[in-house]
Amino acid sequence: MTEQAIKQTVFQLLKKIAPDTAPETLQPDDDIRHTLEIDSFDALQFVVALNENYGIEIPEEDYGKIITLRSLINYIKEKLV
Amino acid sequence: MPEEIVITSHPVHNLPDYESSYHSFSWQKEEQYLTGLPGNKGLNIAYEAVDRHAAGKLANTLALRCIRKDRSTRDFTYTDLQRLSARFANVLVNLGIKKGEKVFALTGRIPELYIAALGTFKVTAVFCPLFSAFGPEPVFQRLSRGDAKVLVTTRALFEKKVAPLLDRLPLLQFILLTDEEVVGNNKVLSLQGLMQAASDEFLIPATNPGDPALLHFTSGTTGMPKGALHVHHAVLTHYVTGKYVLDFQPGDIFWCTADPGWVTGTSYGIIAPLVNGITNVVDEEDFDAARWFSILEEQKVNIWYTAPTAIRRLMRMNIRPREEYKLQFLRLVGSVGEPLHAEAVLWGEEKLGLPVLDNWWQTETGGIMIANYPSLLVKPGSMGKPLPGIEAAIAEITDKDINILTAPGTQGHLVLKKGWPSMFCAYLHEDERYQKCFRGEWYITGDLAKRDADGYYWFVGRADDIIKTSGHMVGPFEVESILMEHTTVAEAAVIGKPDPVIGEMVKAFIVLKQGFTGNENVQQDIIAYARKKLGAAVAPKEIAFVSELPKTRSGKILRRLLKARELGLPEGDTSTLEQF
């Protein structure tokens, strides 16, 4: 799966959880939660959506590894290998 | 009944025997441990929390350690805090701020927030911290209802949430930006610039213990948020609860994870550790399970005060914390915000070697009122026993009367006998609402509870429709008012839907105006609108479209019925229901 495809999926899932935001404006090193002003419940829903969409499991202890758009995409890429 | 736990890990506690301490306790005796302003000029929170320590042997003790998002730290000794809060006090004086005027803060957990709070206490102005995740509308409601004269905030938060409101806030005179180096116009100023120009010496004026010091907004079922006002004398409760409930010992390192935008983050995230002369750790970042465990390890935290939402998240981790992190310094874990289930208490016992000690209080009480104590047998799932000095009871409340129910296990309203030091002294500008909270000598908490034969209290639920989400109170009316502004919405009712992680999530039931259909686009549009106005922490997470809302014959929406239907519970008394 290409980086671009992952990015598009991430944007779609974020938009669904936080429809007031514009995820496509995120810069690679932006803190996703902080920039989009989503709370911890939204963040949890987002991870659940990622898990379901990709058939992966992102455990609670890894949430600190997916803070920025860049780190999230890299993390998903590694999980999908 | 879950198994009971006797804590034996640390034998020397400030409260070695609950029952004897409860019976011998006197607020007057405890007051002797406070210093009072020199020259018998009264009692001021900032003097008790900072200046008296800076003048004594704790002068060079680490008072506050702020951990930035990148994990770098900024440290402040008691002397540093004394000087910086003096500078902030002088800034306020130079701006002409007078006793009793309101100084608000809208920031993340950055050092300026803590310095502003202490400096505001020094000038006997009133400090009101706001949660930085609020959207513009909750921010406006609070600034407006609280008569904000000064606001300390960041450039980004100002531009996003406050600048569009300025025309509607004629009383707001000064905005002090923490991250602006250049002084702006007459209204928007650089805090840094003003601090540099101000003296770091300040003589705290005479302060009556009954002078207002803190304003915290809390939600009601009806109407907009209420501003609960607290006085300087509240510091005695902060001192006593820090000592007896959180068991602060000299040299302790304490971490309260709450944001000062909520009362826990001020009473225990600022005042209680400082008045007890220990080290207060603050993390700027939000919840992150691995980060939190590593902070407990790195900072050698002794006492940790957190919330059920966070504990439930930690419980999801498939790790053995004591094997992966060095947590040997941890001596007490406390929890507040919503009832802590027995499983979470037992998880603490198993994974941390310490049962999580739940306690109960609310914005209006200003400090912990009912608690589990390190020296007391823990009954998992119970909020514990009343703080020494606090008389609690279960009562039946009728229109005009109150009857105290003494039979063990009887459910009723949780009430507290009036008069503890941190009891709120007013709802700002809303005396009628304030008076309604009292019946004779009792304060009605709005919570339903039971007391067992051993004197332990057990939470049952709210007596009203207030929603507890992630430990925060959300008033349905505030949310419904915004939903009603949306072009498609005819009627709205909001409830708390139980959620395994955050306690309750805000769920809205919506009747659409004629001509609109409840599809996903409309749903997303309404959620987006509410989030923009209210912020993610307050806006509904879920929306259901319905054709009508259950109402009384007088037209009042029956939220409890919506909730019962949502949960598949019996609908209770529906005799006043207009339609089935």
Image: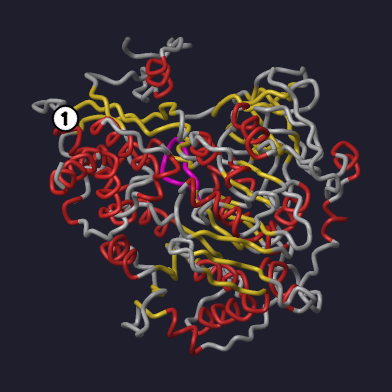
Residue B57 image point, x, y percent: 79, 75
| Picture layout, residue B107 above or below residue B516 | below
Depth check: B354 or B320 in front?
A: B320
Q: What residue is shown at x 28% (from left), y 66% (from top)?
A: B159
| Picture layout, residue B509 above or below residue B115 | above
Query: What is the number of callouts on the image?
Result: 1
Q: In the rendered image, which residue does mark 1 sit on?
A: B520
Residue stretch in magenta: B218-228
Residue B42 image point, x, y percent: 75, 70
Depth check: B269 or B522 in front?
A: B269
Q: Secondary structure at mark 1?
A: helix
| Residue B160 image-quadrant placement | bottom left
Q: What residue is shown at x 53% (from left), y 34% (from top)?
A: B315
Asked if residue B26 is among those painted magenta in the image, a careful observer would answer no
What is the crowding at mark 1: few (fewer than 14 residues within 10 Å), some, or many (at least 20)?
A: few
Determine if residue B441 is in view.
Answer: no
**B117 left or right of B452?**
left
Chain of the residue on which disc 1 is drawn: B
Depth check: B46 or A45 in front?
A: A45
| Picture layout, residue B488 above or below residue B452 | below
Secondary structure that dominates the magenta span: loop
**B552 left or right of B43?**
left
**B153 left or right of B294?**
left
Q: What residue is shown at x 75% (from left), y 29% (from top)?
A: B5
| Residue B37 image-quadrant placement | bottom right
Asked if residue B226 is among those painted magenta in the image, a careful observer would answer yes
Determine if residue B353 is in view.
Answer: yes
Type of amino acid at the residue the image marks with label 1: Glu
Q: What residue is shown at x 45% (from left), y 46% (from top)?
A: B225
Residue B95 image point, x, y percent: 47, 81
Q: How is the image coloured?
A: secondary structure
